[in-house]
């Protein structure tokens, strides 16, 4: 039961020895093999190398990749892909001059999505979300993190997490679930934030943990949402229940959330559009992955994460889509990579490392995916005929993917 990909023009992100992530100058190194073969057995990468060393065997399937490249599938470590309805109305309002913050203050934003989600059945929510999951798989995503956070009641948060669980059971893509009950303060608690935090800590977090519905815990640590002190309280409760932090910080303001994340050994700190020198300094020599979300900066017209400065300071960067109805209604990692190159001055090598191995690390999947390494999942992107991998971000807005393989099986669109 082996599949051979032969005559691969270039096999990208080849790592013979396992790595956890790459940082600083290493991010600009993207090892490849030209004119390569790759063998898949039982859904895993069994062997690869130069074509001249390709074993002669009886393969069940032979795929001729002449002129085409193979990369590991994208690892999208930050999404809110499960949501109900959309927010094109707010999009139009922003074009007419309202700010994202003003829309949120008027009951729009996350609260608007929460209202819709609370009124949507679990089956309907599953159906809407499944469409997006299928779409991102076709766009090359082979591992994805999905957050709750548009429920904001025990019932609706658990409903979201059950939908994520069902998607995980029904689709071959790797899925990690994150509990983001602390995404916004629900209207009923507008004057009683402490009451909502108590509900999260004493009621919802224990339920999520008991039903084993999430592995990670997230907080929107931001002015007007949850302070650094609130964040500590929530992460502390999460930690007590075995949930590892991955947090939203420094999107609009820097309020010491990064330092809280590091203190709690967060797996990642995400957004980082507003970075003080002290924030960059704090992240050095930690195991916390900084995650940039250029789709959000693009869509909201807010600053981009200073990735160039951060990489030059020796830090790693992961790139993710932030797929959500309010600040980034696209899960297209190819666009994310292009935007990182065009707007953040990341090189194609850096952007591909950030979207594969570093993204895998940011969701605890670095031993399973994110590189072409023997024993890892055969989650592969087969490109159309292209001359170099830089053509992927260069040709932004076009799709250079011919076929996506998850666990060695070609996924039909
Ligand atoms: O990651 N920043 C907080 N949460 C989401 C957006 C939420 C929304 O507008 O629906 C984000 O950008
Ligand atoms: Fe987000």
Image (spheres, rainbow, N blue to C red):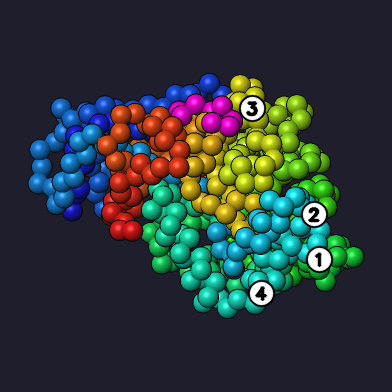
Please state which of the two labelled residues, at mark 3 or mark 4, is closer to the viewer: 4
Kindly tell me whether residue 357 is visible in this rendering: no
Please state which of the two labelled residues, at mark 1 or mark 3, is closer to the viewer: 3
Give the magenta range: 342-349
The residue drawn where x is 57% and y is 54% is 329
Name the residue tied to disc 3: 310
Name the residue tied to disc 2: 102
Mark 2 neighbour class, 10 Å CA radius: few under 14, some 14 to 19, many 20 or more? few
Picture coordinates of residue 45 (x, y %)? 29, 43
Is 348 magenta? The answer is: yes
Question: Element under label 2?
Answer: helix
Name the residue tied to disc 4: 118
Is 353 magenta? The answer is: no
Ligand 1 within 8 Å of disc 4? The answer is: no
Mark 1 neighbour class, 10 Å CA radius: few under 14, some 14 to 19, many 20 or more? many
Picture coordinates of residue 130 (x, y %)? 46, 65
Q: Earlier in the sequence, mark 2 or mark 3?
A: 2
Picture coordinates of residue 136 (x, y %)? 45, 54
Q: Is residue 261 above or below residue 122?
A: above
Asked if the residues shown at circle 2 and circle 4 are in contact, with their CB atoms under 8 angstroms apart, the answer is no
The residue drawn where x is 55% and y is 40% is 319
Tell me how far mark 3 sits from mark 4, CA to CA.
Answer: 39 Å
Question: Element under label 1?
Answer: helix
Which mark, residue 196?
1
């Amino acid at each position: 039961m082996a599949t051979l990909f032969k005559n691969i023009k270039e096999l990208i992100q080849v790592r013979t020895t396992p790595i956890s992530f790459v940082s600083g100058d290493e991010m600009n190194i993207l090892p490849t093999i030209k004119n390569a073969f790759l063998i898949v057995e039982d859904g895993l990468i069994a062997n690869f190398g130069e074509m001249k060393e390709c074993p002669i065997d009886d393969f069940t399937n032979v795929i001729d990749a002449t002129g085409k490249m193979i990369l590991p599938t994208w690892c999208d470590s930050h999404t809110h892909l499960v949501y109900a309805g959309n927010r094109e109305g707010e999009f139009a309002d922003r074009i007419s001059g309202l700010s994202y913050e003003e829309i949120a203050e008027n009951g729009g934003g996350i609260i608007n999505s929460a209202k819709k989600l609370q009124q949507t059945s679990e089956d309907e929510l599953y159906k809407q979300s499944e469409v997006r999951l299928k779409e991102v798989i076709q766009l090359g995503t082979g591992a994805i993190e999905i957050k709750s956070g548009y429920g904001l009641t025990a019932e609706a948060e658990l409903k979201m997490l059950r939908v994520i669980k069902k998607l995980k059971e029904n689709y071959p893509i790797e899925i990690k679930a994150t509990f983001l009950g602390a995404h916004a303060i629900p209207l009923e608690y507008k004057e009683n934030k402490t009451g909502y935090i108590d509900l999260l800590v004493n009621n919802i977090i224990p339920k999520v943990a008991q039903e084993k519905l999430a592995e990670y815990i997230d907080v929107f640590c931001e002015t007007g949402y949850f302070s650094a002190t609130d964040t500590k309280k929530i992460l502390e409760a999460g930690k007590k229940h075995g949930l590892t932090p991955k947090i939203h910080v420094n999107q609009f303001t820097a309020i010491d959330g990064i330092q809280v994340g590091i203190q709690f050994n967060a797996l990642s700190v995400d957004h980082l559009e507003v970075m003080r020198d002290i924030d960059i300094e704090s992240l050095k020599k930690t195991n916390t992955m900084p995650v940039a979300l250029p789709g959000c900066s693009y869509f909201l017209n807010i600053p981009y994460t200073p990735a160039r400065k951060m990489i030059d300071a020796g830090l790693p960067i992961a790139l993710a889509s932030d797929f959500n109805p309010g600040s980034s209604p696209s899960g297209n990692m190819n666009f994310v990579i292009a935007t990182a190159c065009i707007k953040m001055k990341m090189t194609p090598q850096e952007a591909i490392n950030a979207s594969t191995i570093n993204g895998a690390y940011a969701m605890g999947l670095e031993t399973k995916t994110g590189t072409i390494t023997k024993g890892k999942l055969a989650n592969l992107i087969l490109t159309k005929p292209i001359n170099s991998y830089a053509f992927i971000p260069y040709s932004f807005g076009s799709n250079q993917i011919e076929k996506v393989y998850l666990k060695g099986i070609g996924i039909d669109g």
